[in-house]
Image (spheres, helix red, strand yellow):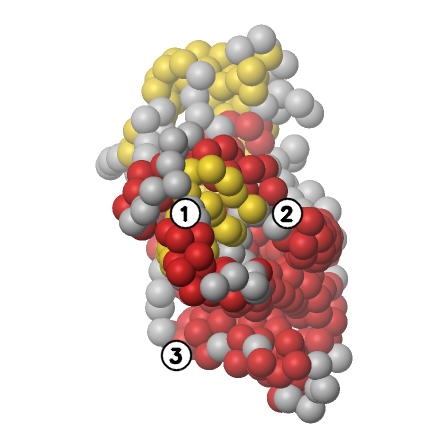
């Protein structure tokens, strides 16, 4: 009971911070793939007087990743004009060139407008259709979810840090007398803080294990059995083996900073 | 005989405005037993603190065990302290450690093996008449017993210099006598230098001693 009481007060805030960190990692990974699918699904249409290569496009804006020419015959088929073959050929020859343009990332609306503005500087380009309204609603929803999640994570981390500061005050109260006596008898800084370091390291390891356990449970007990496609598609993104080491490193760094701050603030009377 | 403590025009102050000890010049030789007396607030404890590097001299020089305390480095100070035995009026025991662990603290700091620590703890606790209390915690002992643990800790590593700040200040007669006996023995049998800050020199003292006094202006005199 004494062991649990002594450790829980550090493990609790540490787990809160590590949960925040792991949620951030997972969210970043899953949104990255979602962002990629949004990006891949998005194209802008460019109408140009002359034929243009991908290098011509890239010369005007560096966000251009892929350019595909849309066959004029396809456009005519869509328009479905009732004209004879010879007239159709003449009409096709008089048509400008149509291009489907993909970008290298999922841009903000203003960045998208910037791309449009850059491309319009070309004398060959006559018109650009960016399909702003569809893009905007998708982008805003995505941005809102991302912002809400980041705010929640930030809030959790701040609370975690406040709890750690409280724990540092408790450590100072519990360990300062011992450290002062040890200093009088010539103990080095390491020796004076050894008890605290050992305890903090145990808590750091336990916190990383608990946080990893929570995410492994979420991955295997909930996400795998979920009916939501978006979750099922990203089940492997929920927890990767390397995440344990990221969490362990983060928790060790946090507790070592906390221990160091406590130890250097203990002044001999 | 070589000097264990050597002060030359030593001035001690907590800040440059408030000088505690003024231009003190004295030396203490190996095997000396020294009492430092003086009125409350005269700077007796301050002088003792400067001996273990808790307070740096403001002016003058102070050499302890051959080390210049004005320019001493942290690592050297740690080394010096590990060869001192210090006894405090408020004992300064570690409450969450057992009596045995408290006694062997200087040995543990110096990296002695657990076997050596255990043997030495038993010997010292027998010496201070606390055999059988190894596993007790300080709060389970009386004030006199706690101070005897403090003295045992000070003697643990056979220090070359024992510094005691009012070691019997809060104690009953029996505990006071035990502590004076221990100090006398350390000085007489082991040739350890002992410096004791006290309000009153004990009526019965069995070995020769020197007596320094500090007046209310912070001047240090030897009383002959």
Residue at 56% x, 61% y: name it.
Answer: A81
Mark 1 neighbour class, 10 Å CA radius: few under 14, some 14 to 19, many 20 or more:
few
Direction from residue A236 to residue B57 in the image, left or right? left
Q: Nearer the viewer, residue B82 or B131?
A: B82
Q: Are marks 1 and 3 on the same chain?
A: no
Q: Output the chain of dot 1.
A: A
Q: Are marks 3 and 2 on the same chain?
A: no
Labels 1 and 2: the sequence-earlier one? 1
Q: CA distance from mark 3 to mark 2?
A: 80 Å
Q: Nearer the viewer, residue A123 or B64?
A: A123
Q: Which residue is mark 1?
A: A94
Q: Nearer the viewer, mark 3 or mark 2?
A: 2
Would residue B66 be visible to someone looking at this image? Answer: yes
Quarter where residue A24 is shown: bottom right
Mark 2 neighbour class, 10 Å CA radius: few under 14, some 14 to 19, many 20 or more:
some
Q: Secondary structure at mark 1?
A: helix
Hey, which residue is sitting farthest left in the picture? B1
Q: Are marks 1 and 2 on the same chain?
A: yes
Q: Secondary structure at mark 2?
A: helix
Specify the label residue A132 is tagged with. 2
Which image quarter holds the C terminus of chain A?
top right
Specify the label residue B115 is tagged with. 3
Q: CA distance from mark 1 to mark 2?
A: 28 Å
Mark 3 neighbour class, 10 Å CA radius: few under 14, some 14 to 19, many 20 or more:
few
Would residue B152 be visible to someone looking at this image? Answer: no
Disc 1 and disc 2 in contact, CB within 8 angstroms: no
Query: x, y percentage for residue B94?
Result: 61, 59
Specify the label residue B121 is tagged with. none
Quarter where residue A86 is shown: bottom left
């Amino acid at each position: 009971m004494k062991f649990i009481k002594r450790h829980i007060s550090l493990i609790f805030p540490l787990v809160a911070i590590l949960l925040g960190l792991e949620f951030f990692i997972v969210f970043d990974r899953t949104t990255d793939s979602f962002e990629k699918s949004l990006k891949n699904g998005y194209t802008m249409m460019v109408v140009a007087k002359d034929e243009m290569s991908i290098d011509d496009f890239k010369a005007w804006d560096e966000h251009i990743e892929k350019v595909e020419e849309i066959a004029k015959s396809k456009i005519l088929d869509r328009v479905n004009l009732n004209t004879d073959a010879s007239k159709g050929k003449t009409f096709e020859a008089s048509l400008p060139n149509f291009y489907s343009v993909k970008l290298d990332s999922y841009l903000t609306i203003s960045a998208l407008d910037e791309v449009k503005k850059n491309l319009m500087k070309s004398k060959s380009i006559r018109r650009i259709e960016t399909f702003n309204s569809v893009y905007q609603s998708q982008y805003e929803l995505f941005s809102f979810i991302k912002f809400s999640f980041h705010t929640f994570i930030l809030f959790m981390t701040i609370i975690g840090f406040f709890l750690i500061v409280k724990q540092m005050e408790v450590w100072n109260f519990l360990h300062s007398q011992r450290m002062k006596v040890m200093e009088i008898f010539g103990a080095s800084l390491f020796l004076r803080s050894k008890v605290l370091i050992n305890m903090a390291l145990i808590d750091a390891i336990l916190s990383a294990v608990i946080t990893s356990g929570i995410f492994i449970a979420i991955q295997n007990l909930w996400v795998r059995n979920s009916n939501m496609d978006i979750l099922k598609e990203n089940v492997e993104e929920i927890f990767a083996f390397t995440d344990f080491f990221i969490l362990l490193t983060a928790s060790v760094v946090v507790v070592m900073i906390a221990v160091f701050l406590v130890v250097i603030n203990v002044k001999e009377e | 005989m070589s000097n264990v403590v050597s002060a030359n025009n030593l001035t001690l102050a907590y800040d440059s405005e408030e000088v505690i000890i003024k231009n003190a010049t004295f030396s203490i030789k190996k095997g000396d037993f020294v009492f430092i007396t003086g009125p409350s607030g005269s700077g007796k404890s301050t002088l003792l603190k400067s001996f273990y590097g808790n307070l740096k001299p403001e002016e003058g020089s102070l050499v302890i065990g051959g080390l210049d305390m004005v320019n001493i480095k942290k690592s050297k100070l740690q080394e010096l302290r590990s060869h001192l035995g210090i006894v405090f009026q408020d004992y300064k025991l570690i409450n969450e450690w057992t009596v045995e662990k408290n006694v062997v603290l200087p040995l543990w700091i110096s990296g002695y093996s657990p076997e050596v620590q255990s043997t030495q703890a038993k010997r010292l606790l027998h010496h201070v008449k606390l055999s059988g209390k190894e596993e007790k915690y300080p709060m389970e002992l009386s004030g006199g017993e706690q101070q005897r643990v403090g003295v045992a800790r000070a003697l643990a590593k056979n220090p070359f210099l024992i510094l005691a700040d009012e070691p019997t200040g809060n104690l009953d007669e029996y505990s006071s006598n035990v502590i004076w006996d221990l100090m006398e023995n350390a000085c007489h049998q082991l040739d350890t230098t002992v410096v004791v800050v006290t309000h009153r020199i004990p009526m019965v003292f069995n070995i020769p001693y020197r007596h320094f006094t500090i007046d209310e202006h912070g001047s240090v005199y030897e009383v002959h």
